[in-house]
Amino acid sequence: MQQQLGNQSHSAAWVIQAWASFIISVAALTIGILHLPVDSWVKGYMGMGLAFTVGSTINVSKTTRDIHENKRLTSRLDEARVEKILNEHHPLK
């Protein structure tokens, strides 16, 4: 009853859609900031906010992925240990 966890790969269409939505959203926000009727220091402040928001989002998503992968590996190791103990213990022997 061992279940293999294979690598989950995304389709090329999904990857293209993810990158396209990211690029379009950042570009649209940048264009919106550039066309605001405010002083350049306000635009710079909003641009820095955009840059830090994008950077923080990337860091959070990477950290979340790493935690998930670590838990998956840990659970597979624990499962292998339990299976080894059960295989070594035969009540009828």
Image (spheres, helix red, strand yellow):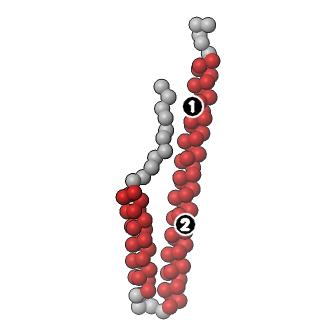
Where residue 55 appears, as percent x and y from the top left, is: 55, 68
Q: Mark 1 or mark 2: which comes first in sequence?
A: 2
Question: What residue is pinned by disc 1?
Answer: 79
Q: How many marks?
A: 2
Q: Report the mark closest to the observer, 1 or 2.
A: 1
- Graded by Cα atoms within 10 Å as few (under 14), some (14 to 19) or many (20 or more), the crowding at tag 2 reads few
Which label sits on residue 56? 2
> In this rendering, is residue 10 above or below 88?
below
Q: Say which amino acid is labelled 2.
A: Ser
> Residue furthest toward the top?
92
Question: Residue 78's image quarter?
Answer: top right
Q: Nearer the viewer, residue 75 or 39?
A: 75
Binning the other alpha carbons within 10 Å of mark 1 as few (below 14), some (14 to 19) or many (20 upward) gives few
Is 1 rendered above or below residue 50? above
Q: Residue at x 46, y 46 (%)?
A: 8
Q: Relative to residue 89, is residue 30 drawn left or right?
A: left
How far apart marks 1 and 2 lie (CA) works out to 34 Å
Question: What is the x, y in percent for residue 57?
Answer: 51, 64
Looking at the rendering, in which quadrant would you find the C terminus?
A: top right
Q: Nearer the viewer, residue 44 or 31?
A: 31
Q: The disc labelled 1 sits on which kind of residue?
A: Glu
The residue located at (60%, 12%) in the rendering is 90
Q: Is residue 82 above or below residue 66?
A: above
Q: Position of residue 67 (x, y in %)?
A: 57, 49
